[in-house]
Structure formats: structure tokens, C-alpha cells
Amino acid sequence: MERRAVRANVLMGSLAAALIAAGVGAGGCTQRLIVICDDPNTPEQELCSAVIDRYRAERCEEAGPGAEGCEDAGAPGEPDPQEQPGTPEDPEGEEGGAGASTCSGQCVPGRPLGWFEPLLLWFGSPGDAPPECPPQAPVFGYEGHGDLVVEPHRCAACACDPADAACELPEAWAAYDTRACGATAGAERTSFAAPEGWDGACTAARAIPAGAACGGGPCAQSLEIQAPRVVPGACAPRRAEPPPAPPAVRWGTYARACVGVAIGRCADPGAVCAPAPQAGNAAPPVGFSTCIIHHNVVDECPSFSPYSERHVFYQGAEDTRACTECSCGEPTGGACSILASAYSDSRCSQLVVSARVSSEATFCGAVPRGVALGSKSASVVDVEPGTCAPGGGEPTGGVAPREAMTFCCLPQ
């Protein structure tokens, strides 16, 4: 019996079985046996040898005494101390004379170095019902996908809530000895400023007494109030709509591989006995191809090998699609206005002038000549916080196939 041990992740990453092989026919135990081992902590040869011996012994016990190839089979689970790899007269350890072929399936070229033994591969549209594994290779050994289809990924639009702006009251108040504030050349300015950090409450700071003279005339003939200032806050970013789920990943091709046992040997020492229909039909079952396999993507099938039709399939796909976070720029277009009042007394009870002052321009208003400016007050009327330009919400990432397996097949 010829042994071929292959790690489980060669054929199917999720396969946990220690043994994957077709059953032995009633003719006996002389066969090529494909074994898959899935224990990374156990040496391959040690694990696989034990599995093969146990499998062989169980099948020979079923076949009965005297079955071909079973003369030296031990009890199930016990290694055969008499097993030898072969003799010079029969280097394969098989029965049959030189040049004789006893293969019950198809004799196909052996695998090139670095590739794994032939198996049967079917692939087609995911909508097609895949065939069951044929009797010659009854064990399902691999499934994969090809022709990845990725639909465009759309992100939800971003928006910005209004900024949490404030209106800063002006501290710069002043009287002029002309009727047009500082617009007149040579006008003399007298400060009527509010305290630093003023909150608008009545204050008698920097009062100007009645009849105060400036340059031969009354100091108070007009009143100038600096424009209030908009203090912008940050805009809070948000998504304008619920984010759509990324489109599902689709595949254009589904593939499955089947593993089996072909009994016997081939006359050509460079060939191996692989599963095929009965009656010596040297072809795989309808819809299947005979293929060798290799981990990862291999750009070309082996040179000087008849396994020339290349197919690459994948276990799945890694989806890293996402959207960038929403963001907001600096707010623009903000404005505010206040109601500013000046009084002749120190307790804000004798009104001299009251005006709505916008953040867009400084206020200037005439007052009675020589009037006392004894106190002032102010309050915010309205605030327009302005708007922020939204950013972000751009698609990132993508979908990439993973865990590739390359199949090189005999032409049909």
C-alpha cells in the first residue's frame, strides 16, 4: 500500500477529521490512500502513519482473510511491525509483474514536486446544484469560490449641527465732541468703556459728567459703541442618514473537490492510479476534472506537466470596507446683535439713548450736547451661529479574497 499524507489545511481549512479517504473495495487493501492530518502539534509522519495503519487494518478486517494486500495487516489501531517499504524486485510494494497495470481507475501523470496528489474537481455557477461526490471519490474534501464580485460601496452623507456660538459684549464705548463720532477730522474721543469681562449688567464705570468740555465744546455730542463679537463654537458632526450596510460579497463560481481511492498500480512508473469510472474508462466522472493542488496563488501550472488548465479558488474573502468619520470645518457666517443703552444717572434709570447694535458694524448715535453719561447696560438679542462645512463619509477599505488554492487540471 502506498501512503500519501497531506495536512488538513491543504484540502480544507475547516476540516477537523484526521482521515479523509474513500472506502476500500471488496478486492482488498492494495490501493493508493489519501490521508489528511489536522494536528499541527503532532509530527506529520507519526500521526499519518498511525491513521493509515488503523484505517488499513479496519478495511482488511472487513474484506476478510486472504484479501489481496491484507496478508500482513495488524489489528485496528496497532502498527504493523512487519510492513516494509518494498523490495528491489517490487519497489512499490505492490503485486504484479513489470509493465502490468492493475489500476481500477485512471492512470494519470504523477504530481510535480511541491504539488499534492490528484483529486477530482468540479466548479460551476453558485446557482447550479453541485453534483454529489462520485462513488470513485466519495469523500467531500474542499469547497471554495472564484470570480469575486464586489458591488460599489456607498457611505452615508455627513452633516454638521449648528455651532454652539456666543455673543461677546463690547467693552469699548466712547463719547465724541462731534455729531458723527470719529468720522469728523480732529474729533476728540472720551472713553466711556465697560469693565473687562462685562456681562451687560448696569455699570457706572468710566462715567462722563454733564457739561464736560473738550476743545472748547461739550465732550458728549455723539456716542460710539463697538460691534459685539461672535465667539464661534465647534460644530458637532453627524451622519445625515443611517449608514447603509455594505453590499454582500458575491462569487461568480463555486468549486468543490472530492477525494477517493483507486485500487491498483499503473504500468508507467511515472503515473499514479486516480479515481475514474469503472470499466477502464480513462477519464474522470462527468463534470469533474482531475487536478493537482497547491497552496496559495501559483501564477503558472508546472512546466512540462500535462496539468495545464489553471484555476484559483478561495476559502472566503476579507471585507475591510468602512467609511471615514464625519468631521466639520470651522464655522462661517455667524452673527449676533445686542440692545445697548446709556443713561445719565448712575443706576441705569434715566435713559439717554438705546440702540440695537449688530456684530457687523460699530454703532454711532447723536446724544444731547453735554449730557451726562453716567451708566450703561447691554443684553444679547440674538445669535446666528453660522454653519460648518461637513467632511468625511468617504468609502475606505475593500474586499480581498483569502486562503487561495491553485488547481492545475488535465485538459478535458
Image (cartoon, rainbow, N blue to C red):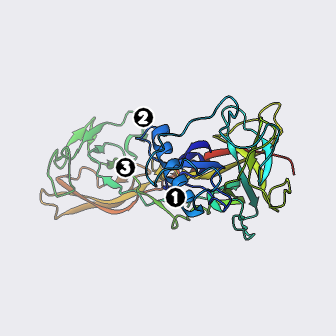
Q: Could you say which quadrant of the image residue 178 lies in?
A: top left
The residue carrying mark 3 is: 227
Residue at left offset 45%, top offset 56%: 386
> Looking at the picture, how far across and down is residue 34, in whole percent?
61, 49
What is the CA distance from the residue labelled 2 to the residue labelled 3?
Answer: 22 Å
What is the CA distance from the residue labelled 1 to the residue labelled 2?
Answer: 117 Å
Q: Disc 2 marks which amino acid?
A: Ala
Q: Earlier in the sequence, mark 1 or mark 2?
A: 1
> Looking at the picture, how far across and down is residue 44, in whole percent?
49, 39
Which is nearer the eye, 161 or 373?
A: 161
Q: Disc 3 marks which amino acid?
A: Ala
> Looking at the picture, how far across and down is residue 401, in whole percent?
62, 48
Q: Are the residues flagged by discs 3 and 1 in contact, CB closer than 8 Å?
A: no
- The answer to whether residue 394 of the structure is visible from this angle is no
Q: Disc 1 marks which amino acid?
A: Glu
Residue at left offset 58%, top offset 45%: 10
Which quadrant does the N terminus fall into?
top right
Q: Earlier in the sequence, mark 3 or mark 1?
A: 1
What is the CA distance from the residue labelled 3 to the residue labelled 1?
Answer: 99 Å
Q: Nearer the viewer, mark 2 or mark 3?
A: 3
Residue 185's tag is: 2
The residue carrying mark 1 is: 58
Q: Is 244 rendered above or below residue 3?
A: below
